[in-house]
């Protein structure tokens, strides 16, 4: 078999790169020199470091913590004198209902898992503002990489309740054909890549996707500008992929927005046991990335920060931006977790009572006269009915055909896969009483087609 050299994938003999791409391939040596009697170090990696005749180690505690931006406080009162809402009343109410929908759906699906009707679920209680507000500041053409607590992103971009339920129940309408765990949503139509379980793998992928968007626009300046948004938790920032992603994005000037939900816990590990630095925001500065820390329970602050981040990411041909959203994880990590084994119940109840992102936006809306108790009740009742209706319909549908587990990797089934299908068919023939073929589309016969 002929081996293809990696370089041949980039350039063909006799083919010249387009002018807009030639500088991308070229590597030039740094033309730096240290002038005599200079007061600053001029060296690759430290271009403007002043010389000092005092030996001194820098101590992190000598530097103040990065500030946390907020537009409205926990009472719904505007605290940023420059803040002006940029949406109509109808748009604000729509986003508020998106947050309510995620909250209500989470409660119903968590209970469904406890009843044995669902194998697994992850809720996002306390973090609804981060996902909905960030998504509201992106365009539908922007590319999104989620982790697994971004139901609000999907809902805001147009994911239907039936889409959530079909994936959760892995039924015949699940686009993934039942091959993925619950809550691992994805949508080609909405430009959201399918969620995968391994932590932080989406981050270098996001940097690569952003680099591709950048090159596409260099080749065709008529294309509309697009950015990539990548979501992750502070626990994922302990993975090597996080550091690789930020460094790639910074050095290649990729138009990507890294959105960190710092919710205080990486499963059972509190933040104080994860790192000693000033959160995740300080790491962005270390990689030369423009960074902001924002109150993640403040819908308006998160939206304003993301709008600005998108603007920055498209400047000068593209560059990365990091947002660290501080938002407490009220819920258990997942249905496989009991968070009261590692944190006090009173701590959780205090956060729920003192600063809930849904309640904060509602207070602001009430102060503007666009929301009240009656509208709240009607919205909650309506959303609950819609969720339960979608739940019941999805639960009744059959599972995807058994043969689907062998398909969609190769254009045609390989001999090995055909042999595996025969072995499975023989196994099912041998133990028919152990399996309920009726719950699968096409039953066992699908293996013989």
Image (cartoon, helix red, strand yellow):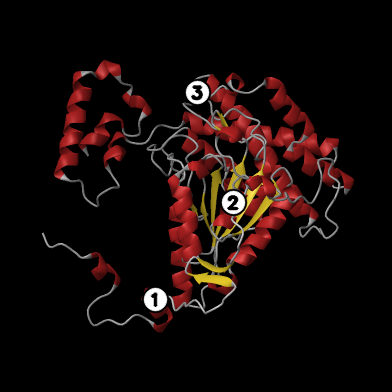
Disc 2/disc 1 C-alpha distance (Å)? 31 Å
> Residue 175's x, y, as percent?
42, 44
Q: How crowded is mark 1: few (under 14 residues within 10 Å), some or many (20 or more)?
A: few
Residue in the foreground of this view, choosing between 60 and 403: 60
Q: Residues within 10 Å of mark 2 (few under 14, many from 20)?
A: few
- Would you say the residues marked 1 and 3 are in contact, meaning their CB atoms lie under 8 Å apart? no
Q: In this view, does 357 lie to the left or right of 51?
A: right
Secondary element at image label 2: loop
Q: Which badge, 2 or 1, is on the more N-terminal residue?
A: 1
From the image, tell me which residue sits under label 1. Answer: 29
Which quarter of the figure is the C terminus placed in? top left
Q: In which quarter of the image is residue 321?
A: bottom right
Which quarter of the figure is the N terminus placed in? bottom left
From the image, tell me which residue sits under label 3. Answer: 117
From the image, tell me which residue sits under label 2. Answer: 57
Residue in the foreground of this view, choosing between 268 and 151: 268
Q: Which badge, 3 or 2, is on the more N-terminal residue?
A: 2
């Amino acid at each position: 078999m002929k081996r293809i050299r990696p370089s041949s994938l980039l350039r063909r003999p006799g083919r010249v790169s387009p002018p807009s791409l030639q500088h991308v391939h070229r590597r030039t040596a740094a033309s730096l020199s240290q002038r005599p009697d200079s007061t600053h170090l001029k060296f690759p990696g430290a271009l403007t470091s002043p010389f000092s005749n005092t030996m001194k180690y820098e101590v992190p505690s000598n530097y103040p913590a990065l500030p946390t931006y907020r537009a409205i406080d926990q009472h719904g009162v505007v605290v940023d004198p420059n803040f002006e809402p940029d949406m109509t009343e109808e748009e604000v109410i729509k986003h508020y209902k998106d947050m309510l929908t995620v909250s209500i759906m989470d409660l119903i699906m968590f209970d469904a898992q406890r009843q044995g009707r669902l194998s697994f679920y992850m809720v996002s209680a306390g973090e609804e503002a981060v996902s909905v507000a960030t998504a509201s500041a992106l365009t539908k053409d922007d590319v999104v990489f989620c982790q697994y607590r971004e139901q609000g992103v999907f809902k805001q971009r147009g994911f239907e309740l039936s889409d959530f339920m079909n994936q959760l129940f892995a039924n015949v309408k699940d686009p993934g054909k039942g091959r993925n765990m619950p809550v691992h949503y994805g949508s080609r139509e909405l430009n959201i890549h399918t969620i995968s379980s391994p932590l932080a793998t989406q981050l270098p992928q996001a940097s690569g996707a952003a680099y591709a968007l950048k090159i596409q626009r260099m080749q065709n300046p008529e294309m509309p500008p697009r950015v990539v948004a990548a979501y992750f938790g502070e626990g994922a920032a302990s993975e090597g992929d996080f550091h690789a992603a930020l460094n790639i994005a910074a050095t290649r000037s990729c138009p990507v927005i890294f959105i960190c939900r710092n919710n205080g816990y990486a499963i059972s590990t509190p933040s104080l046991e994860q790192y000693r630095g000033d959160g995740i925001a300080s790491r962005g500065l270390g990689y030369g990335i423009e960074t902001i820390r924002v109150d993640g329970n403040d819908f308006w602050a998160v939206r304003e920060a993301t709008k600005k981040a998108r603007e920055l990411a498209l400047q000068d041909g593209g560059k990365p931006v990091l947002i660290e959203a501080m938002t407490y994880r009220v819920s258990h990590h997942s249905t496989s977790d009991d968070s009261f084994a590692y944190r006090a119940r009173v701590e959780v109840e205090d956060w729920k009572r003192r600063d809930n992102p849904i309640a904060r936006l509602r207070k602001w809306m009430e102060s503007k006269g666009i929301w009240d108790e009656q509208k709240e009740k009607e919205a909650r009742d309506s959303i609950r009915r819609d969720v339960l209706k979608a739940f019941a319909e999805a639960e009744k549908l059959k599972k995807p055909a058994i043969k689907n587990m062998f398909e969609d990797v190769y254009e045609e089934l390989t001999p090995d896969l055909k042999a595996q299908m025969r072995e499975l068919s023989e196994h099912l023939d041998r133990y028919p009483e152990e399996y309920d073929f009726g719950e699968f589309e096409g039953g066992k016969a699908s293996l013989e087609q």
